[in-house]
Image: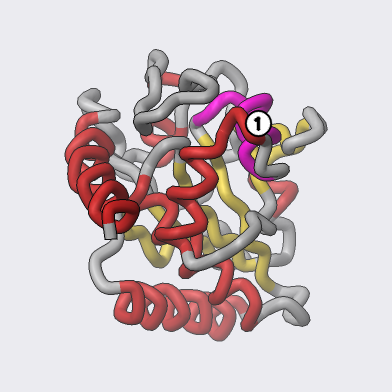
């Protein structure tokens, strides 16, 4: 009970934090920007290359962000529905330093609190989604922290500035033609979020044929 109460408090506190992570004026986008990204191993590509002949689903998040963890859990389960569909690509873009994300994914003991929070809120034991990063966007967090908190960076190089959103998590869907057909920030009720995102993906697939 104490553990659950602890995570609920963290969730409430960090919900307000996520809403403040971006206070710059953003530009709304209607098409997929051709920005450079690199994966967990440091291999660079572009979003348009990843999206070539595919519907692209992008979820933007950071550590530690409880609402992000809830959305990532939903995304894991949605992605599983399309595992054999070569016409859709699911990726995430993380604002956190890639070295920390590596520790997080392999469940390093130095990230114990963040990993526990993720597992509790996402209802997933592991993180299996593709992760990409934007050059110059590397927020950090203390290792072995007993309380979830992070240190943020100049966000002009981060997803919010590139895609025009105000807070995390934000999920977007782009058709094969690069048109943005869905964007949602934060998450309310997981079942409803899952329904909305799944509908958007299916409509994007139909529109792209």
- Quadrant assignment, res 65: top left
Tell me if 86 is positioned left or right of 80 in this view. right
- Quadrant assignment, res 162: top left
Of all residues, the one furthest to the front in this rendering is 2
138 or 176: nearer the viewer: 138
Residue 48 in the image, given as x and y percentages of width and height: 67, 47
Q: Residues within 10 Å of mark 1 (few under 14, many from 20)?
A: some
User: Is residue 170 at least partly visible in the picture?
Assistant: yes
Q: Residue at x 30, y 35 (%)?
A: 27
Quadrant in which the C terminus appears: bottom right
Which secondary structure, mark 1?
Answer: strand
Above or below for 61 versus 136: below
Quadrant in which the N terminus appears: bottom left
Q: Residue at x 47, y 22 (%)?
A: 141
User: Does the magenta portion include 104?
Assistant: yes
Q: Main secondary structure of the magenta part?
A: helix
Above or below for 57 versus 63: below
86 or 42: nearer the viewer: 42
Residue 20 in the image, given as x and y percentages of width and height: 21, 31
User: Does the magenta portion include 16?
Assistant: no
- Quadrant assignment, res 152: top left
Residue 134 in the image, given as x and y percentages of width and height: 59, 29
Residue 113 in the image, given as x and y percentages of width and height: 47, 39
Q: Which residue is mark 1?
A: 36
Tell me if 37 is positioned left or right of 187 in this view. right
Tell me if 187 is positioned left or right of 163 in this view. left
Above or below for 49 versus 129: above
Highlighted range, magenta: 96-105
User: Is residue 177 at least partly visible in the picture?
Assistant: no
Q: Residue at x 73, y 57 (%)?
A: 52
122 or 186: nearer the viewer: 122
């Amino acid at each position: 009970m104490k553990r659950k109460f602890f995570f609920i408090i963290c969730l409430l506190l960090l919900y307000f934090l996520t809403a403040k992570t971006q206070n710059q004026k953003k530009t709304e986008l209607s098409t997929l920007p051709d920005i450079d990204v690199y994966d967990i191993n440091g291999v660079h590509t572009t979003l348009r290359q990843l999206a070539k002949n595919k519907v692209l689903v992008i979820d933007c998040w950071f550590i530690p962000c409880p609402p992000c963890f809830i959305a990532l859990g939903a995304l894991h389960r949605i992605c599983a529905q399309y595992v054999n569909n070569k016409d859709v690509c699911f990726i995430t873009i993380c604002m956190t330093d890639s070295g920390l994300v590596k520790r997080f994914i392999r469940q390093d003991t130095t990230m114990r609190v963040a990993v526990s929070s993720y597992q509790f809120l996402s209802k997933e034991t592991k993180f299996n989604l593709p992760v990409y990063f934007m050059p110059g966007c590397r927020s950090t967090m203390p290792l072995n922290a007993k309380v979830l908190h992070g240190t943020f960076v100049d966000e002009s190089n981060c997803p919010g500035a590139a895609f025009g959103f105000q807070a995390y998590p934000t999920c977007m869907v782009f058709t094969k033609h690069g048109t943005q057909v869905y964007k949602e920030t934060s998450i309310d009720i997981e079942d409803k979020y899952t329904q909305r995102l799944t509908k958007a993906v299916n409509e994007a697939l139909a529109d792209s044929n």
